[in-house]
Amino acid sequence: MKLLISLLTLTVLCSWSSPLNHVSPKAVTRTADVIIYGGTSAAVTAAVQVKKMGRSVIVVSPDKHLGGLSSGGLGFTDTGDKSVIGGLARAFYGRLYDHYQKPGSWTWEKREQFGNKGQGTPALDGANRTMWIFEPHAAEQVFEDYVRENNITVYRNEYLDRATIGRATGGVQKRGNVIQSFRTLSGTLYVGKMFIDVTYEGDLMAAAGVSYHVGREANSVYGEEFNGVQPGVFQHGHYFKTNVSPYKTPGDPKSGLLPEVSPEPIGEKGSGDNKIQAYCFRMCLSNHPDNRIPFAKPAGYDPARYELLARVFANGYTETFNKYDLIPNRKTDTNNHGPFSTDYLGKNYDYPEATYERRREIIRDHELYQKGLMYFLQNDPRVPADVHERMQQWGLPKDEFTDNGGWPHQIYVREARRMIGEFVMREADALGKTTVPNSIGMGSYSLDAHNAQRYVKADGFVQNEGDIGVHPKQPYSIAYGSILPKETECANLLVPVAMSASHIAYGSIRMEPVFMILGQSAATAAVLAIQSKVSPQKLPYEKLKAVLLKDGQRLTL
């Protein structure tokens, strides 16, 4: 009887289909020396590097658009010390410089009118022929140019079969500790000698049975200071600077909590939890009347959802536009700023491990929250008049994300799974206080984590927690072992994005230029390992270092 029920259940599951689980009756096998899974900026630099080294490569991308956040709205590049950005990453920003030298690239303003400064240096750096601040479509075109010029094979809308997530069965076929192939939901089999997971989520890594962590480690795990729960640590302006009641009736707990406030008590300082820093969309906005899509009232809009922000305004808040960072052609890269902004606190905890269907729900929920916030700022009578007036000048750009109504195609996955690999990058490493072994690139940005929760303090007022911004004393090297799984777990996989780092160290490493750097270095190691007929873990570092330096990577100060 149990067997009959199991067979009936299997029949029902197999008969149900959706765009994400349909298996094609004409499933095929595709083979290359290196198989890259993901469509991020690291995917493109990795693929270009494999091609440069004379090996075959296939990019298997669940995304239609290449580039991840670099082409998905994050045009105001988080760079830190630009001098340590080398290789294909630097070449990417060089191509953007060339793009903006063309008069035809300036549609809605003249180049001379664009006087914005980047993070410490000019956006348009003529001395070094680099452009660090750019429009999404310009970045995506550079990535597509790389694909076309290098004749890179890319299969889009191809999702890894994660039916048995976390184990080396189902979608990933292994022989011992070596991946033989993986299957996508279309039924296609991808066979390779080496595999590179460049997803923000680390899906291939997890499905291959590699160890990883989700959430914040306790400070005691790696001997850190800024990991774990951090109440009372305020490094940016993303906290409540005045007393704001979280209750529907101010001061009355019996009235219930307002939306977007967690009823969960905060953990002990420095303790670990399963919370991750908030996600948002990096909106590209336009204030040109001929290139502006007004914000409409989104489905299910409820102004009560934004009551906390109304109370913040009532207390004199004036920083609404502090992160409307200007990019070319009268547009912005709009990021979170303040105690109640585009970061959607606490609504992404299950995203890293979620099914594709559940991830789509989370992404849609973030979109509606953020669109509702924009509508609230433009229309609600509780918003100050001067904010109303300025907000109504902004809308989504008609010439960006044209197949998605001007809305970014990529949510900002600031952090998801993080591998526990051969070497774990820790707080001291990312602060430049140590000498890490076998450098494959460098980082320099602040240890930057966004808030992870909004809670009620003991005094009855609301506060955010998790926002950290600690500056390294100097640029730091990133260890080769941090993109390698333990060899006993997988001997032909490299993971340059969901790489091996503590939560707080990852807060610095997780910048788009660094992902491009690590993508190129991972590809170099993969090809050299094939040539040497060894695992990446056994590849002599001096051999890898020589090629990285030849290709312009910056490895040490």
Image (tube, grey):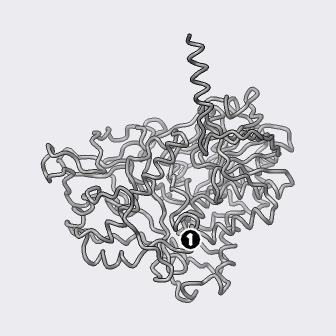
Point out residue 555 in the picture as x, y percentages from the top left corner. Answer: 68, 57
Q: Residue 93 location in percent, x, y? A: 65, 70
**To which residue does mark 1 refer?**
400
281 over 59 or under it: above or below: below
Find numbered disc 1 in the image and state the secondary structure of the residue it sits on: loop
Task: Count every numbered label the image shows and give the total.
Answer: 1
The three-letter code of the residue at mark 1 reads Glu
Indicate the quadrant containing the N terminus: top left, top right, bottom left or bottom right: top right
In the image: residue 235, left or right of residue 44: left
Q: Position of residue 237 (x, y in %)?
A: 34, 62
User: Which image quarter is the C terminus in?
Assistant: bottom right
Residue 192 visible somewhere in the drawing: no
Residue at the top extreme, as displayed: 1
Nearer to me, 518 or 36:
36
Q: In this view, does 551 lie above or below 456?
A: below
Residue at figure coordinates x 75%, y 46% from the top left: 35
Q: Residue 278, relative to residue 10: is it above or below?
A: below
- Between 218 and 203, the residue placed more toward the observer is 203
Q: In this view, does 552 lie to the left or right of 343?
A: right
Q: In this view, does 362 lie above or below 301?
A: above
Image-quadrant location for residue 166: top right
